[in-house]
Image: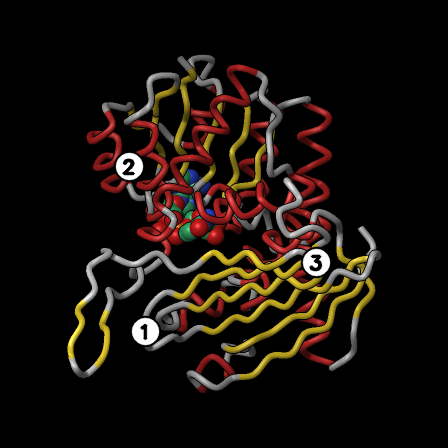
Amino acid sequence: MLNIGLLGAGRIGHVHGATLRGMTTACAAAVSDFVPDAAQALAGRLGAEVMTSEEIIASDKIDAVVIGTPTTTHYDLIHAAAAAGKAIFCEKPVDLSVDRIRECLAAVEKAGVPFMTAFNRRFDPGFAHLQKQIADQVVGNVEIVTILSRDPAPPPIGYIKQSGGIFRDMMIHDLDMARFLLGEDPVELTAVGSCLVDPAIGEAGDFDTAAVTLKTASGKICQISNSRRATYGYDQRVEVHGEKGMLRAMNVPEHNVEFSSGAGFTSAPTQPFFLERYAAAYRAEMEHFVASVVDGVEMTPTGVDGLKAQMMADAADASARDGQPRKLQF
Ligand SMILES: NC(=O)c1ccc[n+]([C@@H]2O[C@H](COP(=O)([O-])OP(=O)(O)OC[C@H]3O[C@@H](n4cnc5c(N)ncnc54)[C@H](O)[C@@H]3O)[C@@H](O)[C@H]2O)c1
């Protein structure tokens, strides 16, 4: 049984806690949160102890930590957990600074501990199947990948201000998905960004509508489209066009009942937001982490995957601001 310390009892802490509660190979042995009531509420549900993050990291009863605290805290927690020899599951983004991510990865390498960047979308059943179809050459040589990712509505402006911007906060998932599906690193990137949804987002120095084009050394192209608004709900689709055909991963509806009448056909809305849409992915990524630590299954996505996505997000932000394309060198 892998004893896990859950750092952070917020939105994502609850998701990972629920997964661990259902597992037989791992459990949440301890929970920490700066807000004692938050830690207590989650720990009570999981039958876990309440401890501080520092106590969890120092405890020899804890084998691994799940870092689900705000991004600004990841750096210190990674360093402390690595030095204590804990396996680390870290929420995305690892940090908002590429240099600081490099320092985290150096600490992890020095300590020789397993480290996983939680890009949960790689574990979504649809996207994972699509990637396997690509690997199995179902569409032959991949030519153009299209990734569409739109939130139902913008987050509060307070969140936007500390998020690192749309490319580092939101598109980072899609930038990782692009590498996952292309099967090779992009070498060129061009980005555009606009503020069309909420002027307050522009006043905060961010974009709410953005697109990126990537090109790999062999010429494969990927287009990513992001919006902080979609009137019809959470929109998460991927299309892969190749020499032998096209693969598409569609939105996941709330149910599969369709109403037909003389006025046309009406089907269910999409899953409302990421917690529902990616519920299966969150479970699968935690199961993968535990299997990797316990059975030595190769751990992915790695810290380097987290670093590369962040480098792409930085390049996208810079390109959207000055209108110039960027070369990507990892
Ligand atoms: N993979 C995904 O789809 C996904 C989704 C949401 C959030 N995230 C990431 O997860 C992280 C947390 O996001 P959230 O939405 O759950 O935030 P949240 O604010 O809901 O929860 C974070 C919790 O951590 C607590 N906290 C702060 N510092 C702490 C510390 N040092 N030790 C213990 N607890 C501490 C806060 O009190 C808070 O309760 C962020 O890095 C975010 O980017 C990832």
Which quadrant of the figure has residue 154?
bottom left
The image's colouring method is secondary structure
Which residue type does callout 3 highlight?
Glu
Relative vertical location of residue 130 with respect to residue 188 in this rendering, above or below: above
* Image coords of residue 224 (percent x, y): 59, 67
Classed neighbour count for the residue bearing mark 1: other residues with Cα under 10 Å, few (<14), some (14–19), many (≥20): few
Label 3 element class: loop
Relative vertical location of residue 191 with respect to residue 312 in this rendering, above or below: below
* Image coords of residue 131 (percent x, y): 58, 45
Which quadrant of the figure has residue 78?
top right
> Looking at the image, is mark 3 or mark 1 nearer the viewer?
3
Real-space Cα separation, disc 2 to disc 1, in angstroms: 35 Å
Task: From the image, tell me which residue sits under label 2.
Answer: 39
The front one of 313 and 183 is 183
Task: From the image, tell me which residue sits under label 3.
Answer: 243
Q: Residue at x 56, y 50 (%)?
A: 93
The front one of 292 and 158 is 292
Left or right of residue 321, residue 234 in this image: left
Assess whether mark 1 and mark 3 are in contact (beta carbons under 8 angstroms): no
Which residue type does callout 1 highlight?
Tyr
Q: Residue at x 62, y 25 (%)?
A: 298
> Looking at the image, is mark 2 or mark 1 nearer the viewer?
1
Label 1 element class: loop
Do we see residue 70 in this rendering?
no
Real-space Cα separation, disc 2 to disc 3, in angstroms: 52 Å
Relative vertical location of residue 169 with respect to residue 135 in this rendering, above or below: below
The front one of 105 and 84 is 105
Task: From the image, tell me which residue sits under label 1.
Answer: 232
Indicate if the residue with disc 2 has its beta carbon within 8 Å of ligand 1: yes
* Image coords of residue 303 (percent x, y): 65, 39
Question: How many numbered dots are placed on residues in this image?
Answer: 3
Classed neighbour count for the residue bearing mark 3: other residues with Cα under 10 Å, few (<14), some (14–19), many (≥20): few
